[in-house]
Amino acid sequence: MASSSLMVSFCTKTRVLGTKLVGTGFPTNLVVRTFVSGASSSSAASSSSSSAVCASLRGLMASARTSSSFNNMVVARTFATRIEVPAMGDSITEGSIASIDKPAGSQVAADDIIAQIETDKVTIDVRAPESGTVTEIMVEEGDTVTVGQHVATLEPGDAPAGAAAAPATPAASAPSTPAPAAPKAAAAAAPTPAAPAAPAAPAAADAGARTETRVPMTRLRKRIAERLKASQNTNALLTTYNEVDMSNLMDLRNQFKDAFLEKHGAKLGFMSAFVKASATALKDIPSVNATIFDNEETVYYDYVDISVAVGTPKGLVTPVLRDVQTMNFADIEKEIASLGKQARDGTLAIDQLAGGTFTISNGGVYGSLLSSPIVNPPQSAILGMHGIQKRPVVGPNDSIVVRPMMYIALTYDHRLIDGREAVTFLRRIKDIVENPVRLVLDL
């Protein structure tokens, strides 16, 4: 034939593709695979069959060398893909391998997570750039890696159609095969249950043992510890307290929560009111929305970016709500829900944690009644929300009434914020939350 081609798929790290044999007399579009003839393309051939096919292939290639046109053969390059540590942010150059999700030999689809890297801020996913088989893992859990480091090797190829469901299929079919012999198996195993009972005695003896377990601190936990202690060592921290009557805000929420959810697709909570009240107070008292730079200058921000503290299984993170001064209640609730989910799933990006001019921490979700939060540097203040409890308070005409009350706390850097400003700021939040109509009327 004037034009013939040979496509070769090899069970090795090197895959020969698109090999062209011109004028060799081979049948057009001859395909030699490492699967036995007639077998499904998703099932691997036995080693003997593979050896036979490879031997046949070597024979074909030897015959090709006798052709005058052998020099026209084009052999494709090695098809191994290096998987490297991705960029992790401007200020992050290294991390620790938190988990290996796809060990060597695993078949993956494009964008599957192969490993996770924990940094001092977020967890970074190392993903497969395309479908194929993981042929080599270069690192182990706990290893320190840097940006651009080679962590795995992938041999590209089509992932089997049932790759994700393959492990489940044998597990589901396994019980059905020996089902007829189940009574015999049960009878044969009848005397054996007594054997596992033997170790029960040592377990009972160890019941009163005093043990301890030492676990290395994660990078995130180390970073949290460093920043919080640095805040205490550097800032002149002071906390002022107040209490808020939540009656009007709770009535507002109960009245409109269903309509709010139907229109905006988000639940109406209390956080949006405190976030919006904080944005208003920060505009009224600029020193709380400022920071000290190099102990030489005070930087005042003309925008409001509020960090919202979110507890996750790996530690506390503070994703940022940007330009809160331009957001309404629905925008705030949607963004808080989205950031909270990403934080718990470990999918926050670095830029979602960077910045922030003020922080709100809601310990009330865990039942906290009163606390003194620590400022998140380089910010200068943090608002602490707490649990709502019914308490007797003095009402109109000196009457004693029961109201749903919340303690609020403002911890601030006394180097920059005076007591008058701190108390005024907290009082402003109290007034807005107790009378939400102030937000509507801009009072």
Image: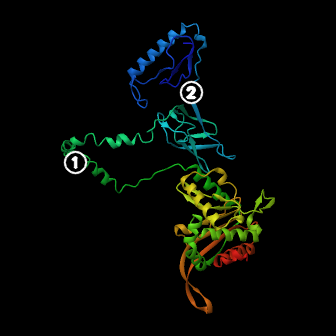
Residue reaching furthest to the front: 1
Please tell me which residue lies in front, 138 or 166: 166
Q: Is residue 175 above or below residue 153?
A: below
Determine crowd level at label 1: few under 14, some 14-19, many 20+ residues with C-alpha closer than 10 A.
few
Q: Is residue 217 above or below residue 154?
A: below
Residue name at image x 57 percent, y 59 percent: 340
Question: Where does the C terminus fall, quadrant-wise?
Answer: bottom right
Please tell me which residue lies in front, 119 or 268: 268
Where is residue 146 shown, x and y percent of the image? 63, 39
**Amino acid under label 2?**
Phe
* Mark 2 residue element: loop
Residue position marked by numbered label 2 in the rendering: 79
Q: Quadrant of residue 425?
A: bottom right
Residue reaching furthest to the right: 296
Mark number, residue 284? none
Mark number, residue 194? 1
Where is residue 366 shown, x and y percent of the image? 52, 67
Q: Quadrant of residue 54?
A: top left
The CA span between labels 2 and 1 is: 55 Å
Determine crowd level at label 2: few under 14, some 14-19, many 20+ residues with C-alpha closer than 10 A.
some
Where is residue 114 shown, x and y percent of the image? 53, 40
Q: Earlier in the sequence, mark 2 or mark 1?
A: 2
* Mark 1 residue element: helix
Where is residue 148 shown, x and y percent of the image? 64, 37
Judged left or right of residue 296, residue 122 is left
